[in-house]
Image (cartoon, grey):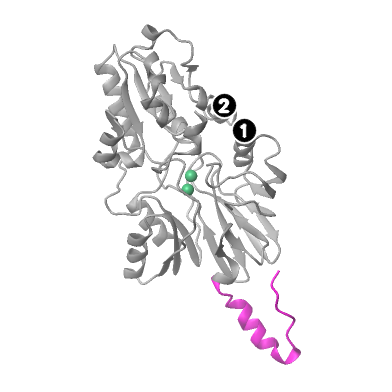
Amino acid sequence: MRGSSPRTTGKIRRKASYICQMRPQDILIPAPAGLCCKPGGFHIDPVRPVERAVITHGHSDHARPGHGAVLATQETLDMMRLRYGDNFASTTQAVRYGEEIALGEVKIKFHPAGHVLGSAQIAVTCKDTCIVASGDYKDAIDPTCTPFEVVPCDVFITEATFGLPVFRHGDAADEVKKLLASVALFPERAHLVGAYSLGKAQRVIALLREQGYDAPIYLHGAMEAITRYYESRGIALGELRAAQGVKKADLAGTITLAPPSATSDIWTRRFPDPVTAFASGWMRVRARARQRGVELPLVVSDHADWDGLTATIAATGAGEVWVTHGQEDALVHWCKTRGLAARPLDLVGYGDEGESEVVAADEAEA
Ligand SMILES: [Zn+2]
Ligand SMILES: [Zn+2]
């Protein structure tokens, strides 16, 4: 709740104009726990336990346990339950895309973010001002989640994981064709594809199926539950098998998806002469692929690339842009050259589980 007391009758006009021109920073403001909406009484993707959390998607840097009330899509709530157990929050409320909810003095609405299954942008409207917190997003096509939707707004909060002009992801289908060409070329070798277990792995599987690959695909144990969850939500992934317990010789010529860390440890000894691949936007940078010992880099990202970020910012029509987690500087500069007000948000605690260099919680689970 805002702390201001009711104005006197003589000041009604002034009050009315003040309300219409509410400053964006009075609606959402960076706080130690995360992006805070004081007039709505909630935080978005808080990194510390809060009373009421609105959560954009299930990656562990955005969806953390221990909050009082959690509002998120059904899929995000289910993913949190899978990862943290039934008591991950005191209460939960599933929100559908397009559904409007009043919280305190604001209204919120969820829109698809195209990042992973259930990912949402949160539009926060207070009086006449609309701010969209997009969480993580991508505008590229992904058969495993609802496509990204452009939401017109006054202020757009964008991630900047790949916020440099050097990052152009290209067509993910072409990357998967590279993988299939390698499988055809080395039928005696196993192919081990490092991919984060929430989102990336299922997208790679779906892309393989789109290319007509119908052989069984093998899974590392750490990604079985989440992959089965995707299937339970109607995402067709073809025949999947656990890699665990399969004879080494039988894995020749097959494809196995595993968390990135598993592709460089002793776990790989069960595979015959494995070709190590890694599906990530970072694979555009050859040095990173070499550093990780990746033989077959696949540029497949769940984040918008430079063109996607800039096209999206322009499409929202926002006059002001707040840039968070990633490479903020270039994007802030780009906005300013286009006459947009822009600033980095300096939120801490988000290194994307899916793409960052930081060892992800998800890898630790493996
Ligand atoms: Zn994410
Ligand atoms: Zn993120």
Q: Is mark 2 on a helix, strand or loop?
A: helix
The magenta stretch spans residue 350: no
Using the numbered discs, state the Cα–Cα distance from disc 1 to disc 2 in whole angstroms. 8 Å
> Residue 249, how many percent across, how many down?
36, 7
Earlier-in-chain disc, 1 versus 2:
1
Name the kind of residue labelled 2 in the image: Ala
Location of the N terminus (image quadrant)? bottom right
- Residue at image position (39%, 62%) is 314
Q: Name the residue under label 2.
A: 225
Can residue 241 be seen in the rendering of this structure? yes
Which residues make up the magenta segment? 1-24
Q: Is residue 104 left or right of residue 222?
A: right
Residue on which the image places disc 1: 82
Residue 4: % across, % down: 70, 78
Residue 238 position, x and y percent, is 48, 21
Looking at the picture, which amino acid does disc 1 mark? Answer: Leu
Q: Does the magenta stretch include residue 5?
A: yes
Residue 250 tag number: none
